[in-house]
Every structure is written in structure tokens, then in C-alpha cells.
Amino acid sequence: MLAKRSAVLFLVAAVLVAAQGLPKLKPGFNLYTKAQDVELGRAAAQEIAKEYQTVRDEQLSAYINRIGKKLAAHPLAESESYPYSFTLVYDTSVNAFALPGGPTFVHTGLIQEADNEAQLAGVMAHEIAHVALRHGTHQATKALGLQLIAGFAGASVGGKGLLGQLAQAGIAFGANSVLLKYSRDAEKQADLLGAQIMAGAGYNPIEMARFFEKLEAQGGSRGPQFFSSHPNPGNRTKAIEEIIPYLPRASYTGDSGQFRTMKQRVAALKGYSEPRRGAASQPAADPASARPSGQYRQYQGRGFTLLYPDNWQAMGNQTADSVTLAAPAGVLQSQSGSAIGYGAIAVYVRDNARTALDARTRQLISELQRTNPSMRVVGTSRTARVGGQQALITTLNSESPYPGQTEVDTLVTVQRPDGMFYLILIAPQSETSRANTAFNRMLNSVRFGS
Ligand SMILES: [Zn+2]
């Protein structure tokens, strides 16, 4: 009896220890769906392709893909949701990065700097972990979502800096994207999950920690690119060492034995150039590349639907109250962050406040002006019907993120029994007539449901 009980106690204790050893890592709060991670990553990958030269070497890409596939096969990588791909890009800086939904890029500099295949696999596993833990869209959500939601929780329209927050809803694509700027906490999680993933593929997780420490020891020389997007959480080796005993016992037989050969192939690559960083990492500031296509698809929001140009992306969540609709090229980088230069924002404010529509509209405009002092009202608001509801249409002008352009913002506020719906249609003045055609189509398509 006694023996039995202590066996049970022992079991309980073992489970507790195991639970402490292998942390349960869950994706953080996220306004995006998994499918939107994939969509967003695909769009961002197109921008990345403009910045980097893909290494066209069959053996190298087969090598990277073999390692990547082996890692992605780990159940925690959730490859059924994320179609991982692995691309070797020519860049002698030491880095690798993964976009939401799975597109993973390895710099040639990473292969050059790694001491063995396990270190390369370790960095790739770390990137896969960022995808599986959805750190990119979590970052994007943090940049906009929490503030938006906090704003909406208040009884009044807005909250603080509404437009600033809304502008951040536009996700910048490319290598400088917010999607690739992780917190230290996210780094720690990616190390821990990455260690499990690499162990599953037969690589010793300690090699990942060793590699990061090697980069760290180099200080400013070759490591900074990696650390600028993956801030060092500190004590990496200790954290990884602590979980190793809880990983399924592995003999670490994953090494293909090809690392040296591949490293030599990388060293012998000819005719490639380094990515054009800086200016090239920003979308071209040409409104033409963000123009509505003329074809439309439907966005299903929470309690509303509308049509939007099919070459635009919907950045938001179907269960959320706001969505940003824009072509990737319509989201511009400025010193103060990213701003929508060409696109639309739809927001459903549910606050049950019984404020008249014109008062609410004025309140919203003054909120917008507070965050964007260059914004001014043009003429007077006109009444309209949108989705069968009473609406006001107000034209505003402000400084466009397109250099030298005035922005025309069409603000459409719509009375709702439980609050207000509004749409801000944004375009540079040079695009007014083209934009208006699309905007009218969008406006006429707005429907409210339950
Ligand atoms: Zn990282």
C-alpha cells in the first residue's frame, strides 16, 4: 500500500518536473488567423524576393531543403498549417529569417559562419519556431491590435492616437518589417521550441546555443544583423541546457556529413551581389503600384461585409472589429513608422453610446486631427446611405506619405444601433479619380449583418 502510494507520488512528481522542464509554449495574442499568417507571409516573400538574390545552386538548395523539411516535420512546427519553404539567399551577413506562415530564408553568411550542420539547423529551427509561435503577426498585433482594442473599450470614439494606431495597422513588408522584429521573450521561446525541433530532427540542441554565443562573442563584427531582429535574451546556453534532459532521448544522428562540401560551394559562389538594403527594402513610393485592380473580392468582418480590390490585402481578423485593406506597396515606411498611402480602413465601434451621428463624426475627426495635425476638413459633410443606414461622408486632406503629395481621405461614418461603423478611404491626390471609382464600389458594397 505504502509502496504503491509512493509510486503514485513519484509519478506525480515526475510529471511536474517534466512540465517545468519543457515549457508549454503557446502563441501570444493575435488578431490574425493562421491562414492570414500564410497570406501575409506570401505577400512579404514577394517583397523579399526584390531585395535578395536567391542562390541558384541545385545542391545547395536541395541541402537547405532537406534540413528544413526534416525540422518542419516536427509536430510542434505545425506544418499542416504552415507551408514551410526554405530559400538560400546571397547575403554574407550572418542571418536567417522566417516570414509568417513559413517562408524561411537562409543567408549564405550563416553557412559560412556555422561550425557544423547542427548549428545551421539550430538557427533554422529557431526560425521555424518563430513561425509556429506566430511571433510575426503577434508583433503586428501588438503594434496595432491591443491599442485599437483598448481604444474601443472606452465609451467614446477613439481613445488615444487613433490614427497613429490605425496607420500602424498597415504592415510594412520586406526585410525591415515589424513582422521580423521580435521581443526578447519571443527569442527565448524560439530558442526553447527550436531546441525541441532540432532535437527531433537528430541535432544536438546545444549547438544552437553555442552558435549564438559565438556570434555574441564576436560583438559588433558579424553578428549584429542577426541580433538586430533577434535580440539576445541572455543566458541562452543555460536555458537550453536546462530543457535538454526533458527532450526525448536522442542520439543526434541527423548530421548528413555534407556540411563541409556545402560550405565550400557557398565560398565558391560567383556572380552574386549583396542585397540592396535601406531604400530597396521600402516599397517603391509610386502610387501606381498600389492601384486598385478593378476586380473585387469580399471581406467578411464581424457584423459587416464589403468588397475590396482583389490585389489588396486584408490585414485584420474576421472576429475583430477593424480591418486595413491595402496593396503591400500602398503601405509606406516613414521615420515615424508605417503609414497607409493608398488603401482603406474599416472600423466597427461597438459602444452602445446614443450619440448623434454628426456629433460622433466631429469627435472622430478631432481625434484624427489630434494624431495628424496636417489633417483638415474640406467643405461640409454630406449625407448618404450606406448599407441601408444613415451615413455622413466627409472629405479630409492631409500630408500624404507619398513625397510631395496631398492625401485625400474620404471619411464615411455610418450610424449603427450598437455604435458606429466607419470607413476611411485613403489615396494621394494624383489618384483621386481612379481611387474614387474603387471607393464608390466599396462603399456601395457595405452590408451589415448580425
Ligand atoms: Zn529569433
Image: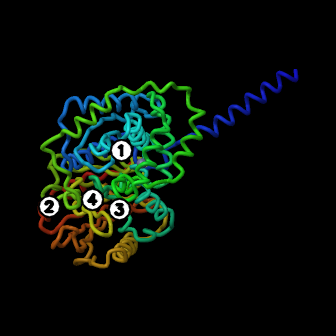
Q: Give me the residue at 50% from left, 67% from top.
A: 155
Question: Secondary structure beneath disc 2?
Answer: loop
Per the model, the C-alpha gap separating discs 3 and 4 is 13 Å
Q: Which residue is mark 4?
A: 344
Per the model, the C-alpha gap separating discs 2 and 3 is 20 Å
In contact (CB < 8 Å): disc 3 and disc 4: no
In contact (CB < 8 Å): disc 2 and disc 4: no
Mark toward the start of the polypeptide (3 vs 1): 1
**Between residues 354 and 134, which one lies in front from this camera angle?**
134
Mark toward the start of the polypeptide (3 vs 4): 3
Q: Give me the residue at 24% from left, 32% from top.
A: 60
**Between residues 231 and 346, which one lies in front from this camera angle?**
231
In contact (CB < 8 Å): disc 1 and disc 2: no
Q: Amino acid at mark 3?
A: Gln
Measured from the top left, where is residue 392 in percent x and y? 30, 68
Q: Nearer the viewer, mark 1 or mark 2?
A: 1
Q: Which residue is mark 3?
A: 168
- Label 4: how many Cα within 10 Å (few below 14, some 14–19, many 20+): many
Evaluate whether residue 310 shows in this view: no
Per the model, the C-alpha gap separating discs 2 and 4 is 17 Å
In contact (CB < 8 Å): disc 3 and disc 1: no
Q: Which residue is mark 1?
A: 100
The quarter of the rendered structure image containing the N terminus is: top right
Labelled disc at residue 286: 2
Q: Nearer the viewer, mark 4 or mark 1?
A: 1
Question: Secondary structure beneath disc 1?
Answer: loop
Q: Give me the residue at 17% from left, 62% from top.
A: 285
